[in-house]
Amino acid sequence: MVKICCIGAGYVGGPTMAVIALKCPSIEVAVVDISVSRIRAWNSEKLPIYEPGLDDVVKKCRGKNLFFSNEVEKNVAQADIVFVSVNTPTKTSGLGAGKAADLTYWESAARMIADVSKSSKIVVEKSTVPVKTAEAIEKILTHNNKGIEFQILSNPEFLAEGTAIADLFDPDRVLIGGREETQGGLKAIKTLKDVYAHWVPQERIICTNLWSAELSKLAANAFLAQRISSVNSISALCEATGANVTQVSYSVGKDSRIGPKFLSASVGFGGSCFQKDILNLVYICECNGLPEVANYWKQVIKINDYQKKRFVNRLVSSMFNTVSGKKIAILGFSFKKDTGDTRETPAIDVCKGLLSDRAHLIIYDPQVAEAQMMMDLSLPKFDWDSQPGSPMQIPTDESVSQSVKVVHNAYEATKDAHAICILTEWDEFKNLDYKKIYDNMPKPAYVFDGRNVVDVGKLRQIGFIVYAIGKPLDPWLKDMPAVA
Ligand code: NAI
Protein backbone atom coordinates (compact mmCIF):
# COMPACT_ATOMS: atom_id res chain seq x y z
CA MET A 1 0.00 0.00 0.00
CA VAL A 2 1.34 3.42 -0.99
CA LYS A 3 1.31 5.90 1.87
CA ILE A 4 0.86 9.59 1.22
CA CYS A 5 1.42 12.35 3.73
CA CYS A 6 0.50 15.96 3.02
CA ILE A 7 2.09 18.72 5.09
CA GLY A 8 -0.41 21.60 5.33
CA ALA A 9 -4.13 21.06 5.94
CA GLY A 10 -5.29 24.29 4.31
CA TYR A 11 -7.52 25.25 1.38
CA VAL A 12 -5.37 23.16 -0.94
CA GLY A 13 -4.00 20.32 1.20
CA GLY A 14 -7.36 19.39 2.77
CA PRO A 15 -9.59 19.14 -0.32
CA THR A 16 -6.84 17.74 -2.60
CA MET A 17 -5.97 14.92 -0.23
CA ALA A 18 -9.63 14.17 0.51
CA VAL A 19 -10.23 13.65 -3.21
CA ILE A 20 -7.10 11.48 -3.62
CA ALA A 21 -8.32 9.34 -0.70
CA LEU A 22 -11.79 9.04 -2.22
CA LYS A 23 -10.53 8.13 -5.69
CA CYS A 24 -7.73 5.82 -4.50
CA PRO A 25 -9.10 3.53 -1.77
CA SER A 26 -5.87 1.52 -1.82
CA ILE A 27 -3.81 4.53 -0.76
CA GLU A 28 -3.59 5.70 2.84
CA VAL A 29 -3.54 9.48 3.10
CA ALA A 30 -2.49 11.45 6.18
CA VAL A 31 -2.91 15.23 6.20
CA VAL A 32 -0.76 16.86 8.86
CA ASP A 33 -0.49 20.40 10.16
CA ILE A 34 1.16 22.26 13.00
CA SER A 35 -2.12 24.04 13.74
CA VAL A 36 -3.97 22.15 16.47
CA SER A 37 -7.24 24.02 15.88
CA ARG A 38 -7.21 23.31 12.13
CA ILE A 39 -6.69 19.58 12.64
CA ARG A 40 -9.34 19.48 15.34
CA ALA A 41 -11.77 21.11 12.91
CA TRP A 42 -10.89 18.65 10.13
CA ASN A 43 -11.74 15.85 12.56
CA SER A 44 -15.03 17.49 13.60
CA GLU A 45 -18.46 17.98 12.07
CA LYS A 46 -17.63 21.57 11.11
CA LEU A 47 -14.70 21.55 8.71
CA PRO A 48 -12.30 24.50 8.86
CA ILE A 49 -13.12 25.64 5.33
CA TYR A 50 -16.35 25.99 3.41
CA GLU A 51 -16.32 24.32 -0.01
CA PRO A 52 -19.40 22.92 -1.75
CA GLY A 53 -19.19 19.08 -1.76
CA LEU A 54 -16.23 18.88 0.61
CA ASP A 55 -18.17 17.59 3.65
CA ASP A 56 -19.45 14.68 1.66
CA VAL A 57 -16.02 13.61 0.39
CA VAL A 58 -14.45 13.89 3.84
CA LYS A 59 -17.26 11.93 5.50
CA LYS A 60 -16.83 9.08 3.01
CA CYS A 61 -13.11 8.57 3.68
CA ARG A 62 -12.22 10.00 7.10
CA GLY A 63 -11.12 7.26 9.47
CA LYS A 64 -10.86 4.75 6.58
CA ASN A 65 -7.96 5.86 4.39
CA LEU A 66 -7.97 9.58 5.20
CA PHE A 67 -6.55 10.87 8.48
CA PHE A 68 -5.95 14.36 9.85
CA SER A 69 -3.23 14.66 12.46
CA ASN A 70 -0.82 16.95 14.29
CA GLU A 71 1.75 14.16 14.41
CA VAL A 72 3.70 15.70 11.57
CA GLU A 73 7.05 13.92 11.95
CA LYS A 74 5.64 10.44 12.52
CA ASN A 75 3.41 10.59 9.44
CA VAL A 76 6.13 12.06 7.26
CA ALA A 77 8.58 9.33 8.32
CA GLN A 78 6.08 6.60 7.32
CA ALA A 79 5.13 8.06 3.92
CA ASP A 80 6.32 7.10 0.45
CA ILE A 81 5.08 10.33 -1.10
CA VAL A 82 5.16 13.60 0.85
CA PHE A 83 3.15 16.51 -0.55
CA VAL A 84 4.11 19.92 0.78
CA SER A 85 1.16 22.29 0.69
CA VAL A 86 2.18 24.92 3.19
CA ASN A 87 1.51 28.62 2.74
CA THR A 88 3.92 30.66 0.62
CA PRO A 89 2.93 34.29 1.29
CA THR A 90 4.64 37.39 -0.02
CA LYS A 91 7.69 38.43 2.01
CA THR A 92 6.90 41.45 4.14
CA SER A 93 10.45 42.35 5.14
CA GLY A 94 14.05 41.84 4.08
CA LEU A 95 15.36 41.10 0.61
CA GLY A 96 12.55 41.10 -1.95
CA ALA A 97 9.99 42.40 0.58
CA GLY A 98 6.63 43.02 -1.04
CA LYS A 99 7.34 40.80 -4.02
CA ALA A 100 9.31 37.63 -3.36
CA ALA A 101 7.66 34.50 -1.98
CA ASP A 102 8.35 33.84 1.68
CA LEU A 103 9.61 30.27 1.70
CA THR A 104 10.13 30.06 5.47
CA TYR A 105 7.34 27.51 5.94
CA TRP A 106 8.51 25.50 2.96
CA GLU A 107 12.12 25.45 4.09
CA SER A 108 11.23 24.35 7.60
CA ALA A 109 9.03 21.57 6.18
CA ALA A 110 11.88 20.43 3.91
CA ARG A 111 14.40 20.41 6.78
CA MET A 112 12.02 18.40 8.89
CA ILE A 113 11.48 15.86 6.06
CA ALA A 114 15.25 15.47 5.72
CA ASP A 115 15.70 15.02 9.47
CA VAL A 116 12.97 12.46 10.14
CA SER A 117 13.21 10.32 6.98
CA LYS A 118 14.58 6.80 7.27
CA SER A 119 13.44 5.63 3.83
CA SER A 120 13.52 7.08 0.32
CA LYS A 121 10.71 9.43 -0.57
CA ILE A 122 9.13 11.40 -3.33
CA VAL A 123 8.67 14.99 -2.17
CA VAL A 124 6.01 16.88 -4.09
CA GLU A 125 5.78 20.67 -4.30
CA LYS A 126 2.07 21.32 -4.08
CA SER A 127 2.41 24.90 -2.86
CA THR A 128 2.95 27.54 -5.52
CA VAL A 129 6.66 28.34 -5.45
CA PRO A 130 9.11 30.47 -7.44
CA VAL A 131 10.70 28.78 -10.43
CA LYS A 132 13.90 26.98 -9.37
CA THR A 133 12.68 26.32 -5.82
CA ALA A 134 13.10 22.59 -6.38
CA GLU A 135 16.85 23.14 -6.73
CA ALA A 136 17.02 24.70 -3.25
CA ILE A 137 14.74 22.03 -1.80
CA GLU A 138 16.95 19.28 -3.23
CA LYS A 139 19.95 20.81 -1.47
CA ILE A 140 18.09 20.95 1.85
CA LEU A 141 16.80 17.40 1.54
CA THR A 142 20.21 15.97 0.87
CA HIS A 143 22.12 18.17 3.34
CA ASN A 144 22.70 15.50 5.95
CA ASN A 145 23.54 12.87 3.35
CA LYS A 146 22.05 9.78 5.05
CA GLY A 147 22.12 7.79 1.82
CA ILE A 148 18.38 8.20 1.40
CA GLU A 149 17.13 9.05 -2.08
CA PHE A 150 14.76 11.99 -2.40
CA GLN A 151 13.07 12.69 -5.69
CA ILE A 152 11.47 16.07 -5.95
CA LEU A 153 8.45 16.72 -8.14
CA SER A 154 6.50 19.86 -8.89
CA ASN A 155 2.76 19.23 -8.98
CA PRO A 156 1.13 22.67 -8.70
CA GLU A 157 -2.55 22.84 -7.87
CA PHE A 158 -4.99 24.56 -10.22
CA LEU A 159 -8.20 24.22 -8.19
CA ALA A 160 -10.27 27.35 -7.64
CA GLU A 161 -11.81 28.02 -4.23
CA GLY A 162 -15.58 27.73 -4.37
CA THR A 163 -15.38 24.97 -7.00
CA ALA A 164 -12.46 23.03 -5.51
CA ILE A 165 -14.17 19.63 -5.39
CA ALA A 166 -15.60 19.86 -8.92
CA ASP A 167 -12.18 21.03 -10.17
CA LEU A 168 -10.40 18.14 -8.43
CA PHE A 169 -12.88 15.56 -9.71
CA ASP A 170 -12.58 16.78 -13.27
CA PRO A 171 -9.40 18.81 -13.71
CA ASP A 172 -8.56 20.50 -17.03
CA ARG A 173 -5.08 19.11 -16.50
CA VAL A 174 -2.77 17.70 -13.86
CA LEU A 175 0.80 18.93 -14.17
CA ILE A 176 3.76 16.88 -12.97
CA GLY A 177 7.28 18.22 -13.33
CA GLY A 178 10.32 16.18 -12.46
CA ARG A 179 13.89 15.37 -13.34
CA GLU A 180 13.07 13.87 -16.73
CA GLU A 181 16.79 13.48 -17.42
CA THR A 182 17.34 10.79 -14.77
CA GLN A 183 15.93 7.27 -14.30
CA GLY A 184 14.99 8.09 -10.70
CA GLY A 185 13.18 11.23 -11.85
CA LEU A 186 11.21 9.38 -14.51
CA LYS A 187 10.24 6.68 -12.00
CA ALA A 188 9.00 9.30 -9.53
CA ILE A 189 6.96 11.04 -12.23
CA LYS A 190 5.37 7.70 -13.11
CA THR A 191 4.56 6.93 -9.46
CA LEU A 192 2.66 10.20 -9.05
CA LYS A 193 1.05 9.84 -12.47
CA ASP A 194 -0.29 6.44 -11.38
CA VAL A 195 -1.98 8.08 -8.38
CA TYR A 196 -3.87 10.59 -10.56
CA ALA A 197 -4.56 7.97 -13.23
CA HIS A 198 -7.10 6.44 -10.81
CA TRP A 199 -9.56 9.08 -12.08
CA VAL A 200 -7.89 11.56 -14.41
CA PRO A 201 -7.67 10.58 -18.12
CA GLN A 202 -4.05 9.98 -19.23
CA GLU A 203 -4.16 12.71 -21.86
CA ARG A 204 -4.89 15.31 -19.20
CA ILE A 205 -1.81 14.43 -17.16
CA ILE A 206 0.99 16.61 -18.46
CA CYS A 207 4.57 15.69 -17.58
CA THR A 208 7.30 18.30 -17.94
CA ASN A 209 10.64 19.25 -16.51
CA LEU A 210 10.68 20.76 -13.02
CA TRP A 211 11.12 24.37 -14.08
CA SER A 212 8.31 24.31 -16.63
CA ALA A 213 5.91 22.96 -14.02
CA GLU A 214 6.90 25.54 -11.42
CA LEU A 215 6.68 28.41 -13.90
CA SER A 216 3.42 27.20 -15.50
CA LYS A 217 1.54 27.74 -12.25
CA LEU A 218 2.78 31.32 -11.86
CA ALA A 219 2.07 32.00 -15.55
CA ALA A 220 -1.44 30.52 -15.36
CA ASN A 221 -2.39 32.72 -12.42
CA ALA A 222 -0.86 35.76 -14.09
CA PHE A 223 -2.88 35.11 -17.28
CA LEU A 224 -6.11 34.65 -15.30
CA ALA A 225 -5.63 37.84 -13.30
CA GLN A 226 -4.63 39.67 -16.47
CA ARG A 227 -7.99 38.85 -18.06
CA ILE A 228 -9.80 40.36 -15.10
CA SER A 229 -7.67 43.49 -15.13
CA SER A 230 -8.17 43.76 -18.90
CA VAL A 231 -11.96 43.67 -18.66
CA ASN A 232 -11.90 45.94 -15.62
CA SER A 233 -9.86 48.52 -17.50
CA ILE A 234 -12.46 48.38 -20.28
CA SER A 235 -15.23 48.79 -17.69
CA ALA A 236 -13.89 52.26 -16.83
CA LEU A 237 -14.03 53.21 -20.50
CA CYS A 238 -17.56 51.79 -20.78
CA GLU A 239 -18.73 54.08 -17.99
CA ALA A 240 -17.12 57.05 -19.71
CA THR A 241 -18.67 56.30 -23.11
CA GLY A 242 -22.06 54.70 -22.46
CA ALA A 243 -20.96 51.23 -23.60
CA ASN A 244 -22.10 48.27 -21.49
CA VAL A 245 -19.26 46.04 -20.29
CA THR A 246 -21.45 42.94 -20.18
CA GLN A 247 -22.26 43.39 -23.87
CA VAL A 248 -18.63 44.13 -24.68
CA SER A 249 -17.25 41.08 -22.85
CA TYR A 250 -19.90 38.84 -24.38
CA SER A 251 -18.98 40.04 -27.86
CA VAL A 252 -15.24 39.77 -27.18
CA GLY A 253 -15.57 36.33 -25.55
CA LYS A 254 -17.47 34.93 -28.54
CA ASP A 255 -14.19 34.95 -30.43
CA SER A 256 -13.03 31.37 -30.05
CA ARG A 257 -9.43 32.57 -29.79
CA ILE A 258 -10.39 34.52 -26.66
CA GLY A 259 -13.19 32.45 -25.11
CA PRO A 260 -15.93 33.55 -22.71
CA LYS A 261 -14.54 32.67 -19.28
CA PHE A 262 -13.03 35.08 -16.78
CA LEU A 263 -14.33 38.16 -18.58
CA SER A 264 -16.72 39.49 -15.93
CA ALA A 265 -16.00 43.02 -14.80
CA SER A 266 -15.98 43.53 -11.06
CA VAL A 267 -14.67 45.62 -8.21
CA GLY A 268 -11.41 43.64 -8.54
CA PHE A 269 -9.90 40.23 -8.05
CA GLY A 270 -8.93 38.85 -4.66
CA GLY A 271 -7.93 35.58 -3.07
CA SER A 272 -4.66 34.47 -1.62
CA CYS A 273 -2.99 33.65 -4.94
CA PHE A 274 -3.34 36.08 -7.84
CA GLN A 275 -1.61 39.09 -6.33
CA LYS A 276 1.05 37.11 -4.51
CA ASP A 277 1.89 34.98 -7.53
CA ILE A 278 2.13 37.95 -9.88
CA LEU A 279 4.34 39.80 -7.41
CA ASN A 280 6.48 36.73 -7.28
CA LEU A 281 6.65 36.59 -11.08
CA VAL A 282 7.60 40.27 -11.15
CA TYR A 283 10.38 39.65 -8.66
CA ILE A 284 11.73 36.67 -10.60
CA CYS A 285 11.74 38.75 -13.80
CA GLU A 286 13.62 41.55 -12.05
CA CYS A 287 16.14 39.09 -10.62
CA ASN A 288 16.68 37.71 -14.11
CA GLY A 289 17.34 41.16 -15.60
CA LEU A 290 13.99 41.46 -17.36
CA PRO A 291 12.56 44.82 -16.15
CA GLU A 292 10.26 45.24 -19.18
CA VAL A 293 8.59 41.90 -18.48
CA ALA A 294 8.36 42.73 -14.78
CA ASN A 295 6.67 46.07 -15.52
CA TYR A 296 4.23 44.45 -17.90
CA TRP A 297 2.90 42.10 -15.20
CA LYS A 298 3.02 44.75 -12.47
CA GLN A 299 0.39 46.65 -14.40
CA VAL A 300 -2.13 43.84 -13.80
CA ILE A 301 -1.99 44.59 -10.08
CA LYS A 302 -2.01 48.35 -10.58
CA ILE A 303 -5.26 48.11 -12.55
CA ASN A 304 -6.73 45.94 -9.80
CA ASP A 305 -5.86 48.54 -7.17
CA TYR A 306 -7.19 51.29 -9.46
CA GLN A 307 -10.50 49.46 -9.86
CA LYS A 308 -11.03 49.23 -6.09
CA LYS A 309 -10.14 52.91 -5.60
CA ARG A 310 -12.37 53.89 -8.51
CA PHE A 311 -15.28 52.07 -6.90
CA VAL A 312 -14.83 53.87 -3.58
CA ASN A 313 -14.40 57.23 -5.32
CA ARG A 314 -17.54 56.66 -7.38
CA LEU A 315 -19.51 55.81 -4.27
CA VAL A 316 -18.31 58.82 -2.29
CA SER A 317 -18.68 61.30 -5.15
CA SER A 318 -22.20 60.02 -5.92
CA MET A 319 -23.25 60.68 -2.35
CA PHE A 320 -22.47 64.40 -2.47
CA ASN A 321 -18.75 63.83 -1.88
CA THR A 322 -19.11 62.55 1.66
CA VAL A 323 -20.12 59.38 3.42
CA SER A 324 -19.21 60.71 6.85
CA GLY A 325 -21.73 59.40 9.37
CA LYS A 326 -23.74 57.66 6.63
CA LYS A 327 -24.75 54.03 6.94
CA ILE A 328 -23.47 51.84 4.14
CA ALA A 329 -24.67 48.25 3.90
CA ILE A 330 -21.92 45.94 2.69
CA LEU A 331 -23.30 42.79 1.09
CA GLY A 332 -20.60 40.16 0.80
CA PHE A 333 -17.10 40.16 2.25
CA SER A 334 -15.44 36.96 0.98
CA PHE A 335 -13.31 37.34 -2.15
CA LYS A 336 -15.85 35.42 -4.22
CA LYS A 337 -19.01 33.40 -3.75
CA ASP A 338 -19.06 29.91 -2.28
CA THR A 339 -16.04 30.44 -0.09
CA GLY A 340 -15.54 31.97 3.34
CA ASP A 341 -11.98 32.96 2.42
CA THR A 342 -11.25 36.68 2.84
CA ARG A 343 -7.58 36.72 1.91
CA GLU A 344 -6.95 39.78 -0.32
CA THR A 345 -10.70 40.25 -0.78
CA PRO A 346 -11.49 43.58 -2.47
CA ALA A 347 -14.02 44.12 0.33
CA ILE A 348 -11.14 44.91 2.69
CA ASP A 349 -9.85 47.80 0.58
CA VAL A 350 -13.32 49.10 -0.22
CA CYS A 351 -14.39 49.01 3.43
CA LYS A 352 -11.16 50.65 4.56
CA GLY A 353 -11.65 53.34 1.93
CA LEU A 354 -15.16 54.03 3.21
CA LEU A 355 -14.05 53.95 6.84
CA SER A 356 -11.36 56.50 6.10
CA ASP A 357 -14.19 58.76 4.90
CA ARG A 358 -15.88 58.03 8.27
CA ALA A 359 -18.76 55.90 7.00
CA HIS A 360 -20.64 53.47 9.25
CA LEU A 361 -20.60 49.99 7.79
CA ILE A 362 -23.15 47.24 8.37
CA ILE A 363 -21.73 44.09 6.87
CA TYR A 364 -23.40 40.82 5.96
CA ASP A 365 -21.71 37.78 4.44
CA PRO A 366 -23.24 34.29 4.59
CA GLN A 367 -19.92 32.54 5.29
CA VAL A 368 -17.49 34.94 6.92
CA ALA A 369 -17.33 35.15 10.71
CA GLU A 370 -17.51 38.53 12.44
CA ALA A 371 -14.11 38.08 14.11
CA GLN A 372 -12.50 37.49 10.72
CA MET A 373 -13.97 40.68 9.25
CA MET A 374 -12.94 42.75 12.27
CA MET A 375 -9.42 41.38 12.08
CA ASP A 376 -9.18 41.99 8.33
CA LEU A 377 -10.30 45.59 8.73
CA SER A 378 -7.95 46.32 11.61
CA LEU A 379 -4.77 44.81 10.19
CA PRO A 380 -2.47 47.04 8.15
CA LYS A 381 -2.32 46.07 4.51
CA PHE A 382 1.15 45.63 3.08
CA ASP A 383 1.03 48.17 0.33
CA TRP A 384 4.05 47.42 -1.85
CA ASP A 385 3.41 50.00 -4.50
CA SER A 386 1.25 52.71 -2.99
CA GLN A 387 1.41 56.02 -4.77
CA PRO A 388 3.09 58.78 -2.78
CA GLY A 389 0.46 60.96 -1.21
CA SER A 390 -2.33 58.41 -1.41
CA PRO A 391 -1.57 55.68 1.10
CA MET A 392 -4.49 53.63 2.40
CA GLN A 393 -5.44 54.84 5.83
CA ILE A 394 -5.46 51.98 8.27
CA PRO A 395 -8.34 52.19 10.74
CA THR A 396 -7.47 51.37 14.33
CA ASP A 397 -9.06 48.47 16.23
CA GLU A 398 -11.12 50.96 18.16
CA SER A 399 -12.40 52.87 15.15
CA VAL A 400 -13.31 49.59 13.46
CA SER A 401 -15.36 48.36 16.38
CA GLN A 402 -17.13 51.73 16.60
CA SER A 403 -17.85 52.07 12.89
CA VAL A 404 -18.50 48.50 11.82
CA LYS A 405 -21.40 46.25 12.69
CA VAL A 406 -21.77 42.70 11.45
CA VAL A 407 -25.29 41.30 10.99
CA HIS A 408 -26.84 38.01 9.96
CA ASN A 409 -28.92 38.80 6.91
CA ALA A 410 -29.17 41.24 4.03
CA TYR A 411 -32.42 42.84 5.26
CA GLU A 412 -30.92 43.69 8.63
CA ALA A 413 -27.85 45.13 6.90
CA THR A 414 -29.81 47.34 4.53
CA LYS A 415 -32.40 48.68 7.00
CA ASP A 416 -31.94 52.46 7.32
CA ALA A 417 -28.82 52.33 5.14
CA HIS A 418 -28.11 55.25 2.81
CA ALA A 419 -26.45 52.95 0.30
CA ILE A 420 -25.92 49.29 -0.50
CA CYS A 421 -22.57 48.08 -1.70
CA ILE A 422 -22.45 44.59 -3.23
CA LEU A 423 -18.93 43.23 -2.98
CA THR A 424 -19.37 39.44 -3.41
CA GLU A 425 -21.54 37.75 -6.04
CA TRP A 426 -23.41 35.46 -3.63
CA ASP A 427 -26.47 34.05 -5.46
CA GLU A 428 -28.82 35.18 -2.70
CA PHE A 429 -28.12 38.85 -3.52
CA LYS A 430 -29.75 38.40 -6.94
CA ASN A 431 -33.13 37.52 -5.52
CA LEU A 432 -33.54 39.81 -2.52
CA ASP A 433 -36.85 41.65 -2.18
CA TYR A 434 -35.40 44.97 -3.33
CA LYS A 435 -38.77 46.75 -3.06
CA LYS A 436 -38.93 45.90 0.62
CA ILE A 437 -35.30 46.98 1.02
CA TYR A 438 -35.97 50.29 -0.78
CA ASP A 439 -38.91 51.04 1.48
CA ASN A 440 -36.67 50.66 4.53
CA MET A 441 -33.96 53.07 3.32
CA PRO A 442 -33.70 56.87 3.49
CA LYS A 443 -33.93 58.54 0.07
CA PRO A 444 -32.18 58.92 -2.25
CA ALA A 445 -31.38 55.21 -1.89
CA TYR A 446 -28.30 53.98 -3.71
CA VAL A 447 -27.03 50.60 -4.87
CA PHE A 448 -23.37 50.23 -5.85
CA ASP A 449 -23.04 46.86 -7.48
CA GLY A 450 -19.40 45.78 -7.57
CA ARG A 451 -20.22 42.38 -9.05
CA ASN A 452 -22.95 43.08 -11.57
CA VAL A 453 -25.46 40.81 -9.81
CA VAL A 454 -28.57 43.01 -9.71
CA ASP A 455 -31.09 43.75 -12.44
CA VAL A 456 -30.22 47.41 -12.94
CA GLY A 457 -33.41 48.27 -14.85
CA LYS A 458 -35.66 46.70 -12.24
CA LEU A 459 -33.93 48.47 -9.37
CA ARG A 460 -34.08 51.85 -11.13
CA GLN A 461 -37.80 51.28 -11.64
CA ILE A 462 -38.19 50.73 -7.91
CA GLY A 463 -36.52 54.08 -7.36
CA PHE A 464 -32.91 53.21 -6.53
CA ILE A 465 -30.00 55.15 -7.95
CA VAL A 466 -27.88 52.33 -9.27
CA TYR A 467 -24.22 52.22 -10.14
CA ALA A 468 -23.07 48.94 -11.68
CA ILE A 469 -19.48 48.42 -12.79
CA GLY A 470 -19.03 49.15 -16.50
CA LYS A 471 -22.74 49.80 -17.15
CA PRO A 472 -24.20 53.00 -18.63
CA LEU A 473 -24.41 55.51 -15.81
CA ASP A 474 -27.59 56.40 -13.99
CA PRO A 475 -28.71 59.88 -15.17
CA TRP A 476 -28.34 61.02 -11.55
CA LEU A 477 -24.67 60.00 -11.49
CA LYS A 478 -23.83 61.67 -14.80
CA ASP A 479 -24.13 65.08 -13.16
CA MET A 480 -21.76 64.11 -10.36
CA PRO A 481 -18.05 65.04 -10.44
CA ALA A 482 -15.91 62.82 -12.69
CA VAL A 483 -14.22 59.87 -11.03
CA ALA A 484 -10.49 59.41 -11.56
P1 NAI B 1 -3.34 27.72 3.91
O1 NAI B 1 -2.74 28.84 4.63
O2 NAI B 1 -4.82 27.55 3.90
O3 NAI B 1 -2.74 26.33 4.45
C1 NAI B 1 -1.39 26.13 4.72
C2 NAI B 1 -1.28 25.27 5.98
O4 NAI B 1 0.08 24.86 6.14
C3 NAI B 1 -1.68 25.98 7.27
O5 NAI B 1 -2.74 25.29 7.90
C4 NAI B 1 -0.40 25.96 8.12
O6 NAI B 1 -0.65 25.78 9.50
C5 NAI B 1 0.33 24.76 7.54
N1 NAI B 1 1.77 24.77 7.77
C6 NAI B 1 2.65 25.77 7.54
N2 NAI B 1 3.91 25.37 7.83
C7 NAI B 1 3.82 24.09 8.26
C8 NAI B 1 4.78 23.12 8.70
N3 NAI B 1 6.07 23.41 8.73
N4 NAI B 1 4.32 21.91 9.08
C9 NAI B 1 3.00 21.61 9.04
N5 NAI B 1 2.06 22.47 8.62
C10 NAI B 1 2.46 23.69 8.23
O7 NAI B 1 -2.80 27.82 2.41
P2 NAI B 1 -3.50 27.29 1.07
O8 NAI B 1 -4.48 28.27 0.58
O9 NAI B 1 -3.89 25.87 1.24
O10 NAI B 1 -2.26 27.38 0.07
C11 NAI B 1 -1.17 26.49 0.16
C12 NAI B 1 -0.34 26.64 -1.08
O11 NAI B 1 -1.12 26.28 -2.23
C13 NAI B 1 0.15 28.07 -1.35
O12 NAI B 1 1.44 28.00 -1.90
C14 NAI B 1 -0.82 28.59 -2.37
O13 NAI B 1 -0.24 29.56 -3.20
C15 NAI B 1 -1.13 27.34 -3.18
N6 NAI B 1 -2.41 27.34 -3.86
C16 NAI B 1 -3.53 27.83 -3.22
C17 NAI B 1 -4.76 27.81 -3.85
C18 NAI B 1 -5.98 28.36 -3.19
O14 NAI B 1 -7.00 28.51 -3.86
N7 NAI B 1 -5.96 28.64 -1.90
C19 NAI B 1 -4.91 27.24 -5.21
C20 NAI B 1 -3.70 26.71 -5.75
C21 NAI B 1 -2.50 26.78 -5.09
Image (cartoon, grey):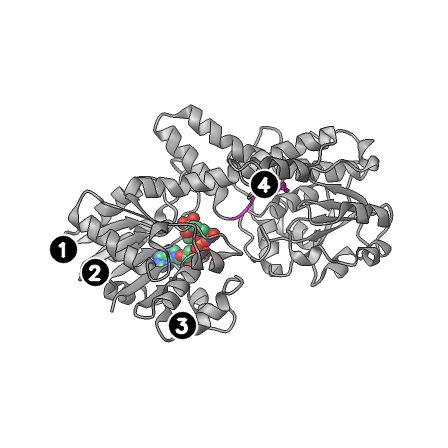
- Residue type, numbered disc 2: Ser
Q: Quadrant of ligand 1?
A: bottom left
Q: Which residue is mark 3?
A: 61
Which quarter of the rendering shows the C terminus? top right
Q: Which residue is mark 2?
A: 117
Element assignment for label 3? helix
Q: Do labels 4 and 2 touch, CB within 8 Å?
A: no
Is residue 399 a member of the stretch shown in magenta? Answer: no
- Residue type, numbered disc 3: Cys
Q: CA distance from mark 1 to mark 2?
A: 9 Å
In the image, is residue 197 above or below residue 326? below
Q: Do labels 1 and 4 touch, CB within 8 Å?
A: no
Give me the residue at 44% from left, 60% from top.
169
Q: Indicate which label's residue lies in the foreground, 4 or 2.
A: 4
Q: Indicate which label's residue lies in the foreground, 3 or 4.
A: 4
- The answer to which of marks 3 and 1 sits earlier in the sequence is 3
Q: Which residue is mark 1?
A: 146
**Is 326 left or right of 150, judged from the image as shown?**
right
Q: Indicate which label's residue lies in the foreground, 1 or 4.
A: 4
Q: Position of residue 208 (x, y in %)?
A: 29, 43
Q: CA distance from mark 2 to mark 3?
A: 27 Å
Q: Position of residue 96 (x, y in %)?
A: 40, 35
- The answer to which of marks 1 and 2 sits earlier in the sequence is 2
Q: Which residue is mark 4?
A: 263
